[in-house]
Image (cartoon, rainbow, N blue to C red):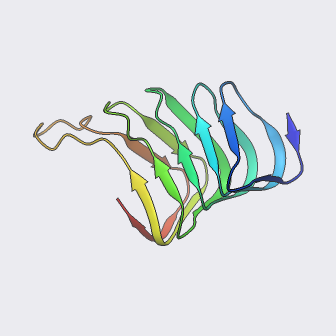
Amino acid sequence: QLAGDVVNGSNGTIWVAGPLRGAMPAFGNAGYVALQGGDLTGVRAFSNAGLLTASDGMARTLGADTFTNQSTGVLSQANGRLSDVLTIAGNYIGAPGSRVQQDIDLALPGNADAGDRIVIGGSASGATTF
């Protein structure tokens, strides 16, 4: 359980291997955060200027009221599998230059499960390159 603001610097790594809950007003990532085996919940505002991965083949939750993918931010589900699902509990804001990386198989016509998915619980705004 974490309380207070969390800042992950440009050379930092946070590996979430189990449930990580807290009361975090702000979570800033300029380094690397991996949701690999666990969910991150209890965040008011998550600002991603680094790399956030959710690519372990499981459904993962980023429990943030607002997730902002900054201009240098990358949200990646790329791992060669089509089964990754990330739920962002609240709003998604994409700054120009932000990116999302996903595995998608366009050769499977009519198959709704032919790619990774991001589920946004609130609204989506801004601009993001996929």
The outermost residue toward the right is 4
Q: Nearer the viewer, residue 8 or 96?
A: 8
Query: Up-down: is 78 above or below 28?
Result: above
Question: In the image, 13: left or right of 42?
Answer: left
Tally of marks: 0
Residue at 62% in and 46% down: 32
Question: Could you tell me residue 22's position as x and y percent?
Answer: 82, 40
**Residue 57: x, y in percent?**
43, 26
User: Is 127 on the left-hand or right-hand side of 130?
Assistant: right
Task: Give the farthest residue toward the front.
Answer: 11
Q: Quadrant of residue 5?
A: bottom right
- Figure check: 89 above or below 14: below
Residue 3 falls in which quadrant of the image? top right
Q: Position of residue 102 (x, y in %)?
A: 35, 45
Where's the N terminus, which quadrant?
top right
The C terminus, quarter of image: bottom left
What residue is drawn where x is 57% and y is 29%? 36
Q: Is residue 8 above or below residue 79?
A: below
Q: Position of residue 95 (x, y in %)?
A: 52, 72
Residue at image position (27%, 34%) is: 113
